[in-house]
Image (cartoon, rainbow, N blue to C red):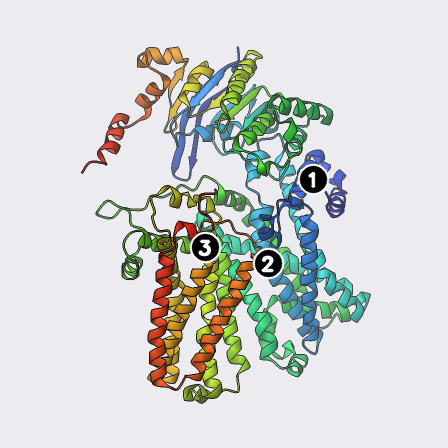
Amino acid sequence: MNPIISLTNVYKSYGAKQVLKGINLSIYPGQVIGYIGPNGAGKSTTVKILCGLISDYEGEVIIDGINLKDDPITIKSKIGYVPELAELYDVLTPAEFLGFMGELYNMPKELADDRILKMLTAFGLEANMHQRMDTFSKGMRQKVLIISGLLHNPDIIILDEPLSGLDANSVIIVKDLISKLAKEGKTIFYCSHMMDVVEKVSDRIVLINEGTVLADGSFEELQQQQGNQSLEKIFAHMTAKESLSDAADQLMSAFGK
Amino acid sequence: MNIINKFFLWLLLFPSGLYEKMGVSVPHLRSILRIKLIMDDRRPNSIQQTKQKKQKKPISFATLGTMLFTGILGCVFLSAFAVGKDYSTKLTIYFSFYIFVLASTLISDFTSVLIDVRDNMIILPKPINDKTFVLARLLHIVIHISKLILPMALPGMIMMGILEGITGVIPFILLILCATLFTIFLINALYIFILKITTPEKFKTVISYFQIFFAIFFYAGYQLVPKLFSKAALENYSITTFSWAGIVPPYWFAASWQYLKTFDLGSPLVLYFVLSIALPILSIWIVIKYFAPSFNQKLSMISGSEGEATPVKADKKGLISTTSVFITSMANRFTEKGTERMSFLHTWKMTGRSRDFKMKVYPSMGYLVVYIVLIFMRNRDISLDAIRDQSGKGKFLFLGVIYFCSFVLIMALQQLTFSDKYKAAWIYYITPIKSPGKLLSGALKATIVKFYLPIVVITSAAAIIIVGPAVIPNLLLGIFNLFLITTIRAYMSMRDLPFSQQQSASVKGSNFIRGLFIMMIMGILAAMHYFVYSYFIVILILCVLSIIASWLMMDALKNKTWDSLVTKVYEG
């Protein structure tokens, strides 16, 4: 089977600062990739490259057999992206915003309208459909963003902290959704800091730090390499420079004189 | 969408076939423009911005409101036609107005409306080609600017039509377009310049300083220019008598109009005509060629996450001190330890760093300076000797300036309870603060030291230099009385904790009455001062009384309890 996403020796620097130092990854259809790493590891940069937001990288990115540099438009139409931080035009209503997204993805209006209504209803937002989003809570905005990433039925879905702000019930819905999408053969690229969710949701975990891939494999494989611990522990073990319990001790000792 | 936006959309999508040939996807172009125009219509403009928070009704038809407002501004420009004896002068003034006002409007629009950094996250990951995106952005700018310049230039065009007929209007329209292009270039150049000298994080602050400067400058021009010259002098004024006129761009546009109107091909004015046409084209070419590519990226950094916080170096003790020695010593001198000192330092830093506060207070301070200049101009018949003599009008003028300064404090005090981050006021409510009055007195003291002390020093120095040491007793009484007025004002108006309230434009009725009351007290004090001016002993006694009264007021403020505050519990 050919990989749907393959990154070969991808480098990227901002000025003198090198953010990605040769990333190599091959991702196959139907996989749920948990993409994890500490702040500043290069996660968002990777995501931005995959979405076509950054084009001045070095190396080769091939998505569904197409080089990203040759035909970004075709690739973009196969990708659904749910950005971190609720970036949306909040003076619009969900219906207007999602309708706009549909138009940008060249969807026929009837199809888009039908899907928008169904998806908003599924998330319990049908009553807010024609309400401006500036009054929305963080969770409601996140739901609209998730819909905007799925609307055109993409083959590849990139999720950047998709659960932020969602209540417990919506979290269950989204987690369930992720595994159902994967069963349909969709590839999911899941970036998060929430290790327990990544552990459960993804069938392959890629850990990066300081621009290089530190670990790549299923959770079980990681456990075999690193000892039988939770992902949180493995993560801390591989990325923290100093012992974390020392830090907690230091915090506690600040009380004493 | 309203009819104006629909019209613009229809007009600009007219050459769809051409766009298609250029490789632009017209359906995408239409969707982006349509959504941008809808958003423009819901974005509060500068007039509605303050109102909007009070009224729950969502903003719509912002476009019409803005256009109406710019139309009125355009009518103000017509005053240019009353000045000068020839069209070179009239039109130079008109074009100066036009360029100045357009620039000051666009300077903020460019970041907030035209280059929306959210586009990068929302539109760019979608399958849209770059040409479509760039054209959409360009057309959006064109629509936005057209909506500004049409109503702004319309009164001028009509006036021109009445005065000179159609042969006057057509060159006028052409030159308005050139002036617009020139202004866009100016703004771009300014942006690039600011980005060069400062970091993207500070960019918005610098821009707001520019806006403050524009506001004051406009006000000063409006107030001072008609008073500087008599009416007859204005009517006979001609800019052509100045040799430097040739180097100011508005003059080029004015001269080109004359050239086009007379159509005397051999006229030396042809030079200006060439300049007027060539300059905008050249400048737009420079913008596209050199500025635009890096511009976008830099602008996205303004609100983007790419600017990393650089850690401030810690001093030897390992603690980072952002409080300067001067502020600390001031705080130590004027406040008691604990809540009050903390409030003093907090207020000092907040007023210095909050853009919101500066935007509201600094312009009014500028207006004050303009007013003081105005007082002197109105009384130009007063010689320096009269002020020195301290008799009659000189005395009046001296007191006028002193008491007038209290407005600065009152402006600052009014803003003190407001903040756009009002929700952060939870810190007052979760901490064990027994007497919230100390928060108020600390804030008041910081305001006095920060905004009033410099003015006191400057006016005192000026008074002592001009009049001599004899003025000192009266000066002192004036200063003490101002403290008294301020403390009374603070006691009455500071009924909420500093920075704890959301800004609302509608001043409550009771607030207005309080304002009147304080004006009355000020009037009485000033009048009293005027009558006892030359009685040295009385002045001394009043000084002492005034100090005692201020001290009592400050004490009363300090002892305010939670019960006396309007907002007793956290409402964030």
Residue placed under numbered mark 1 in the picture: B34
In terms of secondary structure, where does tag 3 sit?
loop
Whether B137 is drawn above or below B445: the answer is above
Give the distance between the C-alpha atoms of the residues marked 2 and 1, in whole angstroms.
26 Å
- In the image, residue B425 lies at what x, y percent? 42, 46
A102 with respect to B210 (left or right): right
Horizontal side of A92 relative to B259 (left or right) equals: left
* Mark 1 neighbour density, 10 Å: few (under 14) some (14–19) many (20 or more): some
Give the amino acid type for the residue marked by disc 1 in the picture: Arg
Dot 2 alpha-carbon crowd within 10 angstroms: few under 14, some 14 to 19, many 20 or more: many
Label 3 vs 2, first from the N-terminus: 2
Residue B103, label in figure: 2
Cβ atoms at labels 2 and 1 below 8 Å apart:
no
Q: Looking at the picture, tell me which residue is in the foreground, B496 or B353.
A: B496
Identity, as a three-letter code, of the amino acid under mark 3? Arg
In the rendered image, residue B468, in percent from the top left (x then y), is placed at 35, 84
Direction from residue A42 to residue B218 in the image, left or right: right
Which residue sits furthest left? A257
How many marks on residues? Answer: 3
Residue plotted at (49% across, 43% down) = B303
Q: Is residue B458 visible?
A: no
Residue ID for mark 3? B495
The residue at 42%/55% (across/down) is B351
Tag 3 subunit:
B
Q: Which residue is drawn at 66% across and 52% down?
A: B145
Q: Mark 1 lies on which chain?
A: B
Which mark is in front, 3 or 2? 3
Front-most of A244 and B453? B453
Q: Is there CB contact under 8 Å for labels 3 and 1?
A: no
On residue A58, the disc is none
Between marks 3 and 1 in the image, the one whose residue lies nearer the viewer: 3
Give the Cα distance between marks 3 and 2. Answer: 40 Å
